[in-house]
Image (tube, rainbow, N blue to C red):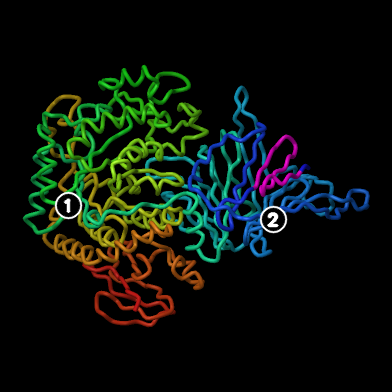
Amino acid sequence: MKFINDNGALVFYHNGEMCRIEAWGKDSFRVRSTMLGKFTGNNWALTEETPAVQTQVTVEEEDHWVGDGTVDKREIATITNGRLRAVVNFVGILSFYRDDKLLLREYFRMYDGTLSRESRCLKIANRTWKGIIGGTEHSLNVKFESNDGEKIFGMGQYQQPYLDLKGCVLELAQRNSQISVPFALSSLGYGFLWNNPAVGQVTFGKNYTEWTARSTREMDYWITTADTPKAILENYTAVTGRAGQFPEDLMGLWQCKLRYRTQDEVLTVARQYQAEGIKIDQIVIDFFHWTVQGDWKFDRTYWPDPKAMVDELHAMGIKVIVSVWPSVDRRSENFGPMLERGLLIRTERGALQTYDYQGDCVEIDPFNPETRKYVWEVCRRNYYDLGIDAFWLDNSEPDYGVYDFDHYRYCDGPALAVSNIYPQMYGRVFYDEMSKLGKPVVNLLRCAWAGSQKYGNVVWSGDVPSTFEAFADQLQCGLNMGLAGIPWWTTDVGGFMTDDVNDPDFRQLLIRWYEFAVYSAVLRMHGDRGPYNIPPLDDRDWGGGYLHTGQPNELWSYGEENYAIMRKYYDIRISLHDYIKSLYDEASENGSPLIRTMFYEFPDDPVCWELTDQYMFGSRYLVAPILHLNQFEREVYLPAGAWRLTSTGEVCEGGRRVTVAAPLEYIPVFERV
């Protein structure tokens, strides 16, 4: 083993591997290793400038028993950054300590020349590289010892009921409604970023934790420590970036449905909202308002004067956002030029196709700067110059026809090596140009990766079913997304997939979901509402008229009683405007999410680390959503202190559980007194 102090970084070499540990922010280290002799230079999510810190690097000898019973001297190295210390032993095993207390250690079960290593005959290494035949990439497996009693949170969004991820196996890959943001927050007081966009897997097992990358050139992770989850997230967002200032005029209601087919439909809905005295902040024009995928323009048959439409909506104080997909149909006017210039994803074998919904399509390669320039110029000319305010960047995983990641290649390399950062690169097609114009950028995306929070992304949870089970899953999705550094998160109110809008069970779900959404970052009406008995506008197989549309999805679309409830909660949302602005400001200042786990605000209360069905909206409001059909009361845990039930004004003492009535027109919300 060879240890080097490289200007305050610890570098060591072992069995052909070069490893580098360096300070990277407050009480934090970045750890990289490679079998290729040099690092790529990619910082991936670690984009922010960090202040210089003083480290201490030491190399010393320790006594080790060897097989014949004698004592030998072996070198170990230590690097310290503030409260965090990393120790490397003579076979390259890394251990991390906070204030001399062990936080995390690599898992190693091999013969190392000592008698102290248990199960040394297993031959399991802490870091395993396997070269991919014919290429420079390797598969990588990194293991850590599991800590008993530890809870793990963050990691983005997975459609499952588990808030605590200990014991879970998570695919590190992007799919519709699955968002891989590989930052884990531990109840033991550390945060861990797997700073690698490769497709892979993480297992937070009881026996060990295992991270894998199917194709990569280097290991890259970042670790930090702090006393509270809030401080850990502050450290993390200091190195990966924070959300910008969210515009005040987008903090109310966003109106959307699948799908407004004509500009007359959009204007009719907007005028009705105005007549009802309800201010909508933004109206969304969904997919297939275009000719074919990849033309990125209005079908003028049904949108004859989009600028006049936008001007009228702006006069009502309504902003306009349009759907843009990364898929390019072979019939598109842009397909030939983009294919010729290498601006589309390539396939490794067989036909050139990556997506097949409503057309034979290939999706764009946003890793290529020429692609980003090309797509922006088309969308600027056909949308932005008409006054369109923002873009709904749907299918941003991208949504492959088949998620065979080994089949696709970008200009930066195989999809297996970099695909997880695709949604961030797609978002930057628009953010990088729009941010130059001096206005806040707020675009809507279906996916994200570590650091996406700094690129003007409102992320929604994808095309999820309209069921109470899915609703409950979205709560843990949103809480874990916040703990992964993504504060601007939202859902389709009522879920996306509805068979029958007249089903009373669905309408109950819609109300419960809407009540929850009022106490979230973005209140947005959207969904694919059946039954599909509305005839198409024409019989062409392309353009803005042929595709089906969903049932109406405005606040008044579900009967007078439900409208009254939604109108009441709309008024609550508007009354919270100044408070919601303060939460967005806090997200920009320290990375705090708007919806927060109970332990985020009450880290010293052990009960709060167990709660999965209630949350804090900022620091003031405790929200207990109704997650089951025909549930009209529920138990709520109140941490220590005084809490006012907003429905009655009753003040309750905390440190206990209370049972609260929850009629359809109310979900339990407590305000800290």
| Residue 215 picture location, percent across and down | 56, 33
For label 1, the crowd category at 10 Å Cα-Cα, with few meaning under 14, some 14 to 19 and many 20 or more, is: some
> What amino acid is found at the position of numbered circle 2 in the picture?
Gln
Residue 229, compared with residue 202, is above or below; it is below
Q: Main secondary structure of the magenta part?
A: strand
Magenta extent: 3-21
Secondary structure under tag 2 reads strand
Q: Position of residue 145 (x, y in %)?
A: 66, 53
Q: Residues within 10 Å of mark 2 (few under 14, many from 20)?
A: some
The answer to which of marks 1 and 2 sits earlier in the sequence is 2
373 vs 536, left or right, is right
Q: Residue furthest left?
A: 275
For the residue pair 76 and 114, the one nearer the viewer reads as 76
Q: CA distance from mark 1 to mark 2?
A: 67 Å
- Is residue 240 in view from this perspective? yes
Instruction: Report x, y in % for residue 430.
Output: 32, 38
Residue at point 67% right, 32% down?
A: 37
Q: In this view of the protein, which residue sits in the foreground, 381 or 575?
A: 381
Question: Residue 502, which numbered label?
Answer: 1
- Return the x and y of residue 57 as percentages of the image width and height: 71, 53
> Relative to residue 18, is residue 592 depicted above or below?
below
Q: Taking 585 as reference, is 634 above or below it?
A: below
Quarter placement of the C terminus = bottom left
Of 46 and 297, nearer the camera is 46
The label on residue 155 is none
Q: Is residue 408 visible?
A: no
602 or 561, which is in the foreground? 602
Asked if residue 472 lies left or right of residue 234, the reply is left
The residue singled out by tag 2 in the image is 56
Residue 548 quadrant: top left
